Image (tube, helix red, strand yellow):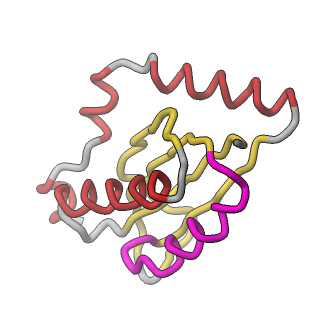
Amino acid sequence: MRKYENLVIVKPTLTAEEIQANIAAIEEVITSNGGEIAATDAMGMRKLAYPIAKNERGYYHVIYYTVEPSAIAEIERRFRINEEMLRFVTIKYEKKAETKAWDALVEKTKNAPAAKAEEAAPATEEAAAE
């Protein structure tokens, strides 16, 4: 099994519950294809570098996982047909130095304080105001 990282950007027009449901669906796509999620990092609502589908902002979420390389095509296909996602990127960690960096990122994410996760969770009022 290889180590991967996915950064997904979800539409900001969704409510907090809808965003969390979309993130859960994304994680379910990975696990249903034989992947094991090592860590996740909810980066929260951020301004995009450029507008995507008339959206100036997006909800960023990073998922670190291991999966067989043959499953990546199906995972990315399911990401593409999800209309609530603005963008996604899949990064493969293959070389020894890269896998050490992946392990460090997973540990850093797991050891992040719980306050950061609460801060990154989208608030309904913030989403409605923008």
Q: Is residue 23 above or below residue 50?
A: above
Which residue shows up at 66% across the image and 69% down it? 73
Pinpoint residue 114: horizontal percent, then vertical percent.
Answer: 30, 22
Left or right? Give the position of 3 relative to 120. right
Pinpoint residue 83: horizontal percent, then vertical percent.
Answer: 40, 80
The quarter in which the C terminus is drawn is bottom left
Is 58 in front, or is 81?
81
Q: In this view, does 66 lie above or below 85?
A: above
Is 73 in front, or is 105?
73
The quarter in which the N terminus is drawn is top right
Give the number of marks.
0
Left or right? Give the position of 21 relative to 30. left
Majority secondary structure in the magenta region: helix
Is residue 50 a member of the stretch shown in magenta? no
Which residue shows up at 46% across the image and 51% down it? 31
Which residue shows up at 51% across the image and 33% down it? 38
Image quadrant where residue 108 sits: top right
- Outermost left residue: 125
Pinpoint residue 37: horizontal percent, then vertical percent.
Answer: 49, 40
Q: Is residue 107 above or below residue 46?
A: above
Provide the residue span drawn in magenta: 67-85
Pinpoint residue 68: horizontal percent, then vertical percent.
Answer: 68, 51
Is residue 81 a member of the stretch shown in magenta? yes
Left or right? Give the position of 46 relative to 115. right
Is 49 in front, or is 76?
76
Which residue shows up at 39% across the image and 64% down it? 10
